[in-house]
Amino acid sequence: MIEKYEIWIFVPAFADTLIDVSGHCEVSSLGRVRTNGRLRALSINKRGYSFVSLSSNGWTKTFKVHRLVAMAFHGSPGMGMEVNHINAITTDNRSENLEWVSHKQNVDHAQSLGLYRAGESHNWSKLTEQDVIEIRKARSEGVKRRVVAEKYGMTEDGIKAITTRRVWKHIE
């Protein structure tokens, strides 16, 4: 659906910040931000999300635009809720493209679109799938966590996360 009209709503008060921008900051249904009637320039962070810096009472804070729009048009989030971009375009902050979801729902959505990288295809991965198999085998054979951690240049907590399947869940 293409919106014919842009709707502006004042940003509600935030419970999680010292800065109260409610009453002088508006967001639009098209994902734009203005204060005192003037459009604000948006910036893009390194993860690809739009943000804006807002000031109040001598304090300045950056806000992600998608969260401002979602709060204004979809209400306050429940505990632990995140904003999902339905079309997966992180700069498309139109209210119709945003929804509150749990972290699991957000990850599932990204995985269904092929956007979520896990295992060795993840940018931060230090290990290969074969390393994970070897780590789990060594631990099942009684090799101490400290010894395994030293071999792979990891922490003991990292090894525990692998052996308890908190991470690398997709590897048997």
Image (tube, rainbow, N blue to C red):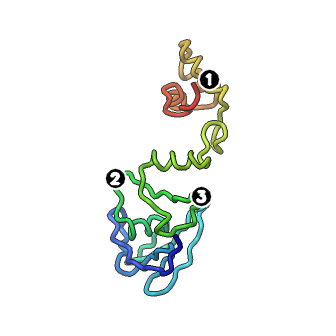
Give the distance between the C-alpha atoms of the residues marked 3 and 2, in whole angstroms.
23 Å
Measured from the top left, where is residue 57 in percent x and y? 37, 78
Q: Amino acid at mark 1?
A: Ile
| Residue furthest top as drawn | 141
> Is 91 drawn above or below residue 124 in the view shown?
below
Instruction: Give the camera-side residue of 169 and 157.
Output: 169
Q: Is residue 68 left or right of residue 50?
A: left
Q: Is disc 3 surrounded by few (<14), some (14 to 19) or many (20+) residues within 10 Å? A: few
**Mark found first going from the N terminus, 3 or 2:** 3
Relative vertical location of residue 119 with respect to residue 19 in this rendering, above or below: above
Q: Residue at the location (59% across, 17% down)?
A: 138
Check if mark 1's residue and mark 3's residue have beta carbons within 8 Å: no
Q: Which residue is mark 1?
A: 133
Establish if 149 lies above or below 21: above
Residue position for label 2: 79
Q: Secondary structure at mark 3?
A: loop
Disc 2 on helix, strand or loop?
loop
As drawn, the residue found furthest toward the bottom would be 37
Q: Position of residue 55 (x, y in %)?
A: 44, 76
Which disc number belongs to residue 103?
none
Quadrant where the image shows the C terminus:
top right
Kindly identify which residue carries mark 3.
47
Identify the amino acid type marked 2: Met
Identify the element where label 1 is drawn: helix
The reply, left or right, for residue 172 in relation to residue 75 is right
| Amino acid at circle 3 | Arg
